[in-house]
Amino acid sequence: MWRAYAVLLLLATPEADFRQAVEALARGELSAAEQGFQRVLKAQPNHPGALGNLGVVYSRMDRVPEAIAVYRRALKLAPGEPGLSLNLGLAYLKLEDYAEAKSLFARLPPTPQTTELLATCRLFTGEVDLAIGALEKLPRTPGVLYLLGTGYLKKKERDRAQPVFEELLTSSASPAQAYYLSGKAYYESALFDEAAAAFRKALEMDPSPPGARLELGKTLISLRDNAGAEAELRAVLARNPRDAGAAYYLGALLVLEARAGEAIPLLERARAARPDGWGSYYYLGRARLELRQRAAAIELLEKAAALNPEEPAVHYQLARAYQAAGRSADAQRAQARFSELRRAAPEAPVLYNPSRKD
């Protein structure tokens, strides 16, 4: 829905490499742009323009952790630069790290775009009323309508959500996009039957966008239609083997089906793309435990626990791994932590998101 924009800082940048890299980025030639900005940085490691634009390249390549790293380097050199802060927030949004993104968007001057982005983060960090209040004042674009519908569903106000989705179908969105956005809203509200129907309608109207097929695969996992989910996710990967989201969800599904050997290469691909996402470590740990690779399982599950210490399932699997390794005291502590967290939140999702912590 949102994308990073090239950050052309007002600096003296006479280098031919920089100009050529900017031109390559404008043409969408990402590999050439990356090489050009890297050459600039080799000569001038503290070149904010090259760093900021290299972040754009990485973001468009879906190399999001690398984008975040270079945006942060650029912000140290040009603190307060709004374009960099915006792009860094958008990168965190790609990882669904809404808390980090919210802190960045909250500091930006209020515009329709930044207001919508901040409302998005608030919607997915529990500040639903604040999000709805801001969204209701914005122009009713397809993105705003999607977010409003999601907010009403989160408040269990389906009577308010339904007219919003009907309006979405008559908005500037294509019918396929409208059904796709409605499906995402239903999915976020755990209304999986409605989500699957909307995604199928979107694909019926336009089978080409991979996003709807990925979302349908995720939804079918929640509906426990594993065969259907596997088919959809494999179709996404057949079209784009680098799709980290499809690799993650298919790998996780295969772990749940006790197919660890098939799952591990997919999950390793997902972990390489998003090394700060706890979910890949969690499912890799479960896969290694299934294969009786106990030391590796413990290392991976401990990493998952460090990244998301509030997730009960991580501590449950850690307890299993410690027990299998003969570490009874550690197993008891992990089991006690699992029990404590489960009492506080007895309902657990069927499939864990690779990066979100809610």
Image: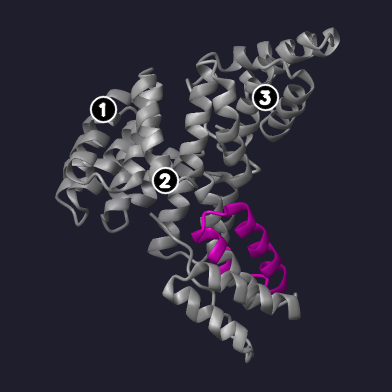
Query: Nearer the viewer's eye, disc 3 or disc 1?
Result: 3
- Report the label total: 3
Q: Earlier in the sequence, mark 3 or mark 1?
A: 1
Which residue is painted at 61% across and 84% down in the image? 17
- The secondary element bearing badge 3 is classed as helix
Compute the Cα span from label 1 to label 2: 23 Å
Q: Which residue is mark 3?
A: 285
Q: Which residue is mark 1?
A: 194
| Range shown magenta | 57-85
Residue 51 appears left or right of 139: right
Residue at image coords 49%, 74%: 25
* Mark 1: amino acid: Glu
Q: Is residue 193 left or right of residue 352?
A: left
Q: Is residue 293 above or below residue 177?
A: above
Question: Answer yes or no: do the residues labelled 1 and 2 have beta carbons within 8 Å?
Answer: no
* Residue with the mark numbered 2: 131
Q: Residues within 10 Å of mark 2 (few under 14, many from 20)?
A: many
Residue 290 horizontal side relative to residue 200, left or right = right
| Mark 2 or mark 3, whichever is nearer to me | 3
Quarter holding the C terminus is top right
- Mark 1 / mark 2, whichever is N-terminal: 2
The local secondary structure at tag 2 comes to helix
Question: Which residue: 53% across, 59% down?
Answer: 59
Tell whether 103 sits left or right of 147.
Answer: right
Provide residue 14's location: percent of width, then percent of height. Answer: 63, 92
Check the picture and name the quadrant holding the N terminus.
bottom left
